[in-house]
Amino acid sequence: MSAYWKGRKVLLTGATRGIGRAMAETLVAEGASVLGVARNTAALEEMTRKLGPRFDGLEADLGDPEIPRGVVNWVADAHPDCSVLINNAAVMSYPLLTDGSNHDVGIEEEVQINMIAPMQIATALLPRLAAQKGARIVNVTSGLAVAPKTDAPIYCATKAGMRSFTRSLRYQAEDAGLHIGICEALLPAVNTSLSRGRAERKMPAPEAAAAILAGAEAGKAEIWIGKTKLLRRVMRLSPALAHGLMRRIEA
């Protein structure tokens, strides 16, 4: 059992599916309490039955611009000793932006869930987290934040935005003397309902979850997971080659 996670309260968005679910199950097994945010009430209830009193679920649709404030208020009122935030919730669409269709609603929702909501939650919780020993903010992004692919332009843009935001927030926290570890977890293609592609080519969700939690525990600023480690090396050698490889990747 990890000494770091035992006894901690962790606010985790996207807690009922894929990587989020795997992280929630691992955290509870490690002795943490999970404040799970998701928009599927039935899934939250099932998680509560399975994980017991150390899982407290909140039904919340982060696509609603008013909801991030509600999540922060819930933490402040019910769980003021929360010391870790993991911004994991995300959606990925595959719009063909050149087809002449009106994509406004889809763009707004994807940007709200993937970028605006996690930025707002992280910023609002900074003072509360700073009061807790060993606090962490973990923003889950993707190798697509480094080099985008063709068929998911909004997702790639939001993850690139979160990559930049995470670094800038870390700088500001350091300058302000806030003792919060602020890190980015860069995922490869993971076998979840979020992405396309053949399952055998993708990392299992429990393996990705374990890598995120291990990197966060270690206090890493960047957690390069699976094939993103290779992408990092290729990008250093030849950005043009990296972008070419990622352009049509199945993920």
Image (tube, rainbow, N blue to C red):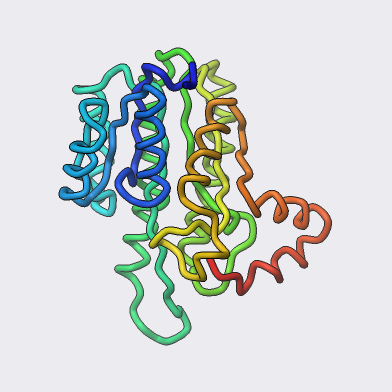
Residue plotted at (33% across, 22% down) = 82
Residue 37 placed where, x, y %? 27, 41
Image position of 193 (left or right of 77): right
Image coords of residue 248 (percent x, y) = 61, 74
Q: Position of residue 245 (x, y in %)?
A: 70, 69
The residue at 59%/26% (across/down) is 218
- Looking at this view, is 97 or 57 the one in front? 57
- Could you tell me which residue is drawn at 52 percent across and 45 percent down? 207
Q: Looking at the rendering, which quadrant does residue 195 occupy?
A: bottom left
Residue depicted at 58% across the width and 22% down the height: 174
* 168 is higher (above) or lower (below) than 42: above
Would you say residue 213 is visible in this rendering? yes
Residue 70 at least partly seen? no
The percent coordinates of residue 68 (x first, y second) are 28, 41
Q: Residue furthest right?
A: 237
In the rendered view, would you say 186 is above or below 12? below
- Of all residues shown, which one is farthest toward the bottom? 99
Foreground residue among 72 and 194: 194
Asked whether 109 or 34 is in front, the reply is 34
Locate residue 27 relative to residue 151 in the image: left or right: left
Instruction: Tell me: 101 left or right of 218.
Output: left
Q: How many discs mark residues in the rendered view?
A: 0
Q: Quadrant of residue 234?
A: bottom right
